[in-house]
Amino acid sequence: MSITDQTRRKVSLASQLHIDLPLLSGLLFISLFGLLIIYSASGEDNAMLTRQLTRLSIAFVILFVSAQIPPHWLKIITFWLFIIGLIMLIAVPLVGESHKGAQRWLNFGVILVQPSEMMKLIIPMMVAGYLSEQHLPPVPKQQIIAALLIIVPVLLIAKQPDLGTSLLIASSGFFVLFLAGISWRVIGGLLLSAAALLPLLWFYLMKPYQKQRVITFLNPESDPRGSGYHIIQSKIAIGSGGGFGKGWLNGTQSQLEFLPERHTDFIFAVLAEEFGLLGVLLLFILYLFIIFRGLYIAIQAQESYTRLLAGGITMIFFTYFFVNVGMVSGLLPVVGLPLPLVSYGGTSMVTLMAAFGILMSIQTHRRLLDQ
């Protein structure tokens, strides 16, 4: 059997299993890279590495399961997922559990569930499902209805308080609206409205610690041992990595524990210190490969729903990546967003893998229809 025939058989088998091999390869490479960084950032903690490996395994199983669901079935169940998500968000302030001063979790006995994480995926599914039933580009009435589908859960999440997640979810819904073809005039109006609402956000909606994050972003040196400590140490770590880094397990800021949250939100600084610019570029290439693959799947999608959903999911992933790198580099305020597929943790990883499973379902079910 020739190499070409073997390749065709592998592609055919992957399609039957509803796995997109290029996307899966990119996800595996980033995940393995993340395990290396976590091992170093945790001070060579084998227990933490094992927990992360277990979570990764579960996340990839969820990816495989979600990839088996045909897109038209996803469209059918989206409304009910949206209703369940809203009910859970309403239940959070009533019976939810608090951690680190925020009430965001529901305890179901066996597991703690954070409904806001689920809505990161449900909102673009709901908006895409609604808009795909309308004539595109959407008229003002349809735009208003889509906006309400986004605003209601966003306000519920912002009250937890979780401003960072609420803004991310708002952007995930907006990306779908943008891909549906809303005019630049409408986008300009939304941006002007958002700018006009900034004083209201500052004086009435933002908590003191959230205001402090903005002040720290503008001038971290104003409180170098307090609120500015994280970002100052992060920038020192990134800058000290140079072109080729200090070597794996040899980062001084991380190994000597100057850098806080080094295995979660600020893990990018650990990577930059130990692998330098070369390691950062490698990571960026992997992320861009996944993003371009997702956009390719969106372009190849056969109907409005799958096209909007695939594009929205891809842009959510890009936002995760862009905001975390910008936050750790001091280019954006700190919002507590992990580096996707690299930071230690399970909830956001499971959500992302479910989303990538949907991307694979869109791509592979399209191929089956073509055959």
Image: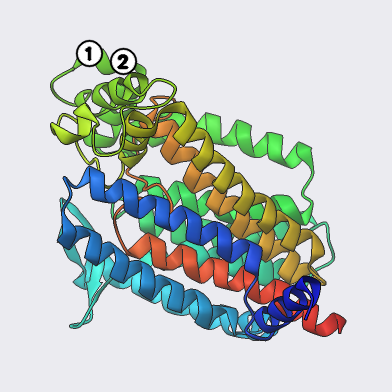
Labelled disc at residue 341 = none
Amino acid at the residue labelled 2? Asn
Labelled disc at residue 222 = 1
Do residues under tags 2 and 1 come within 8 Å of each other at their CB atoms? yes
Image check: 40 left or right of 370? left
Q: Position of residue 177 (x, y in %)?
A: 69, 54
Labelled disc at residue 219 = 2
Q: Position of residue 211 (x, y in %)?
A: 29, 30
The front one of 263 and 306 is 263
Whether residue 104 is visible:
no
Task: State whether residue 127 is above or below residue 139.
Answer: below
Q: Position of residue 210 (x, y in %)?
A: 29, 36
* SS assignment at label 1: helix
Image check: 179 left or right of 19? right
Q: In which quadrant of the rendered view does residue 24 lie?
A: bottom right
Amino acid at the residue labelled 1? Ser
The front one of 97 and 9 is 9
